[in-house]
Image: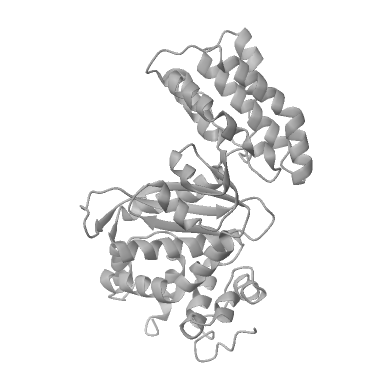
Amino acid sequence: MGSYPHIRSSSKCRQTYAVPFYRQEMDWLQMGAPLARETTSNWCIKCALTYFEPVYDRLHEYLVKRDLLHADETVCQVLHEEGRTATSTSYMWIYLTGNDGLPPIILYDYQPGRAGNYAKNFLEGFCGLLECDGYTGYNSVENVILVCCLAHCRRYFFEAVPAARRKKIKLLDINSPEEIPEDAADPEKAKEDKRIPAEIGLCYCNKLFRIERTLKAMFPEERKNKRLELEVPVWDSFWSWLATVEPLGGSLLEKAVNYAANHKELLGNYLLDGRCEISNNRAERCAKSYATGRKNFLFHDTVNGTRSSAIIYSLVETAKANNLNVFQYLYTLLLYMPDYRQEPAGVEAMMPWNDFIKERCSKVMDTETETPENRGQIPF
């Protein structure tokens, strides 16, 4: 890039926007840099698997030592994978730390399928609370307490509402800019108004979300106590009401009722710990980050390319969660990891919460002078 100083700033903004290599190739050409997509692709794979993976592996070690995690998975496609067709469905799994007050970690893991053993293997050594949706694959993870997501339960009731009425409903969250309206979170009034069961179930879920919004600023123990006081009666009323619902066989309402009934214990497990969240939306937002990029690049070409994407997404999202400048963090890794990737102390220094990294990656960096020749040493 030394011959093209005018495109340095443009290259920075491409790091986190999932711009496909063929589009980058056209953009570089327009700026006077004929850079083939095969070249940029190989650069990313080389950097990820050689220089970034040791940092990813160390983050993984930290992740499984926590006692509160979230998990989710979303589909992806790999064109060239031995023993599989190009149209086979693969999965990008997402694992991240919860609301435990420690530095956040977000890791993506590519796997060719959705079997529970993939989560079991990745989370080996983890012991604690695992927040997830109702997917049975997570039952394979050992030594954990599963915490089922209320947002998924609510979504089933929402889908059972007729389309015309559904258009007027917003699925608001405790972190949404606007609060859930009181009349949308009053199941008793919904019963008096003789609304359909799907709408009543939706009101019960909304009432719990509305209460949770008032508990956000509390310390975990205080939040736990308030949940037991305010939310347990709502759950008791919900389960009593649910037992009276007789949905038509094969209907969307039956699907919602069965989902709730089958996950009764898991839906209430968030009450065990004030740090737990009532939904798994934290993980879904991370899955959405990947899904948004997937709309641009559509598919991965090779397994190595997919693994590289998982590693890079992990470092980017973890850097963002730790309030780092993403470009500066990746740039710093490339400055130091070629010499330190096999030294545990060097890899440890690259953790996003390390003082060395926070100082370098939380302010503007002069990349014109920060070069391998004058980078200095890592202060162990």
The answer to whether any part of residue 359 appears in the image is yes
Q: Nearer the viewer, residue 8 or 30?
A: 8
236 vs 56: above or below:
above
- The residue that appears at 47% across and 78% down in the rendered structure is 334
Rendered location of residue 84, percent (x, y): 22, 54
307 vs 250: above or below:
below
- The residue that appears at 59% across and 80% down in the rendered structure is 345
The answer to whether any part of residue 183 appears in the image is no
- Residue 266 appears left or right of 93: right
What sort of colour scheme is used for the picture? one colour
Report the quarter where the C terminus lies.
bottom right
Q: Nearer the viewer, residue 74 or 68?
A: 68
- The residue that appears at 45% across and 39% down in the rendered structure is 135
Report the quarter where the N terminus lies.
bottom left
Rendered location of residue 370, percent (x, y): 54, 84
Rendered location of residue 372, percent (x, y): 49, 87
- Residue 180 appears left or right of 136: right
| Residue with the most extreme bottom position | 373
- The residue that appears at 74% across and 45% down in the rendered structure is 220
